[in-house]
Amino acid sequence: MRSGIFRCWYMQDSQAVKYRVKFSKKGALRYISHLDVMRYFQKVIRRAEIPVKYSEGFSPHQLLSFAYPLSLGYTSDGEYLDMVMTERVNEEEALRRLNECSESGIKILAVKELDEKARNCMACVFAASYNITIREKITLPDDFCKKVIDFFGQETIPVNKPKKKNGGSVLIDLKQYLYDFRMIDDRTFYICVNSGSETNIRPDFVAGSVCEYCNVVPNENPFYIHRVEIYENISDNENVELRALI
């Protein structure tokens, strides 16, 4: 019965087809975990009757891949997942169906077919951009904006980055992993930083470093962090040339 519904908006294809989905995450749903987001999309895809491909074996699952999980409490306009379809679909119709089955906190922004040789979205991640806002409960000095500009304008930015394992920290030059910066308003600044698997610069770490430089004492939950976009590096040399995943 479902195949009759599918045939009005997809073309049969003997090969599996890769698609990339871009979505936003806002409102109350920013407090659901990455695992919950995965489960959420599994249900949405079934409800939307998207012809997603399943793995083989005793416990088949949808072939989905997510890029760079968002930290709990962050909002975003630049989240991505890849899925493998059993058939080629109409991108606009797939976008409409997914949004009709989604909750208000998650909106599907784009659906795009990928080349069959394209890497999955997680493997593509090189950098990410964020808007970081210091919450109103934090007292800022009158010259906060100038101090933030001075911090990012240094020729080198030595900071102690926490190690992932075994505790401790390592001294790095943040400047090497910073690709863009600008002030948005008197409490908000934009950054684009390296987010690769080897050198992942967390936005809350950057915000904490800024506060330390500016002699600002952050208390519990001091920052509102919004991910703007995720990028891949399309340069074939030592230079960095960023492009959004869609």
Image (cartoon, rainbow, N blue to C red):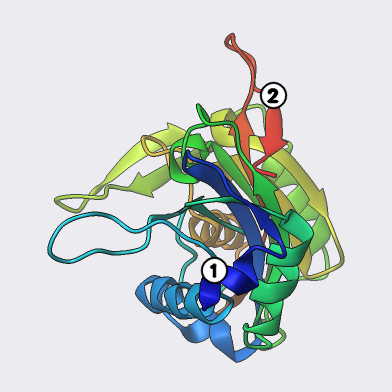
Which residue is depicted at the point 65% across and 73% down? 98
SS of the residue under disc 2: loop
Rendering coords of residue 197 (x, y %): 38, 39
Residue 117 x %, y % = 50, 26
Residue at figure coordinates x 51%, y 36% from the top left:
124
The residue pinned by badge 1 equals 3
Height in image: 213 above or below 24? above
Figure quadrant of residue 224: bottom right
Residue 171 lies in quadrant: top left
Label 1 Cα crowd, 10 Å radius (few <14 / some 14-19 / many 20+): few
Front residue of this view, candidates 63 and 198: 63
Q: Is residue 176 visible?
A: yes
Looking at the picture, how far across and down is residue 121, in whole percent? 50, 44
> What's the amino acid at mark 1?
Ser
x 48%, y 33%: residue: 119
Using a 10 Å C-alpha cutoff, classify the residue at mark 2 as few (fewer than 14 neighbours), some (14 to 19) or many (20 or more): few
Q: Disc 2 vs disc 1: Cβ atoms closer than 8 Å?
A: no
Observer able to see residue 67: no
Q: Answer with mark 2 or mark 1, whichever residue precedes in sequence.
A: 1
Disc 2 vs disc 1: which is toward the camera?
A: 1
Q: Is residue 153 left or right of residue 80?
A: right
- The residue under the point 51% across, 40% down is 125
Residue 216 position, x and y percent, is: 61, 69
Quadrant in which the C terminus appears: top right
Q: Secondary structure at mark 1?
A: helix
Q: Mark 2 highlights which residue?
A: 241
Please, is residue 185 above or below residue 12 in the view?
below
Q: For the residues marked 2 and 1, what is the alpha-carbon distance in whole angstroms? A: 43 Å
Q: Which mark is residue 133?
A: none
- The residue type indicated by label 2 comes to Glu
| Residue closer to the observer: 118 or 230 | 118
